[in-house]
Image (cartoon, helix red, strand yellow):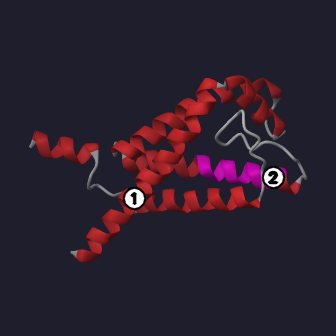
Amino acid sequence: MLKHAVREAIGVALRVLVGGVFLIASVDKLGNPEPFARAIANYRLLPVEFVNGVAIVLPWLELLVGLMLVAGVRIRAAATVATVLLAVFTLALVSAIVRGLDISCGCFSQTAAERIGWGRVVEDVALLFGALLVVVWPPQRWSLENYVRRVSQ
């Protein structure tokens, strides 16, 4: 019983942490789509015609995933999307570093000069691991879905 409670508590903490990071990351991108599009283009991974679409859709996806994780709605699905996004972000960072690009990360603030670097890769890998744990052991306690299920019974 205690083991399950500890796993649930860790799962909830990870769920809220990863969700919170996605929420914070989405806010500035939603308010500054043009600089975010430039940040995406600077990675030189996407054809130019896809950059604006990604710059418009990605922040909304981050916002949705963040809200779902923090609230505890469709936890496994939201954590799976977060895991995929974090894997893509990590690969993009590593690719840019290996190619010697000295560019802004585009991770959080579009107005601050957040440079790419191995520290950011380590942060993304840690978040990726946390999101993956939530996929494997989705915590049900303290979630909106669990509350609705209990109330409707």
Residue found at x 45% / y 45%: 78
Mark on residue 13? 1
Label 1, residues with CA under 10 Å away: few <14, some 14-19, many ≥20: some
Mark on residue 95? 2
Indicate left or right for 28 with 79 as reference: right
Disc on the earlier residue, 2 or 1 = 1
Give the magenta-colored segment's residue range.
Answer: 85-96
Mark on residue 83? none
Asked which secondary structure carries label 2, the reply is helix
Asked which secondary structure carries label 1, the reply is helix
Relative to the observer, which residue lies in front, 107 or 86? 107
Give the main secondary structure, helix, strand or loop, of the magenta stretch: helix
In the image, residue 59 lies at what x, y percent? Answer: 58, 32
Name the residue at the front extreme: 112
User: Image quarter for residue 11?
Assistant: bottom left
Check disc 2 and give the amino acid type. Answer: Ser
In the image, residue 43 lies at what x, y percent? Answer: 81, 41
Name the residue at the left extreme: 153
- 51 shown above or below 82: above
Query: Does residue 94 belong to the magenta stretch?
Result: yes
Indicate left or right for 94 with 27 as reference: right
User: Image quarter for residue 52?
Assistant: top right
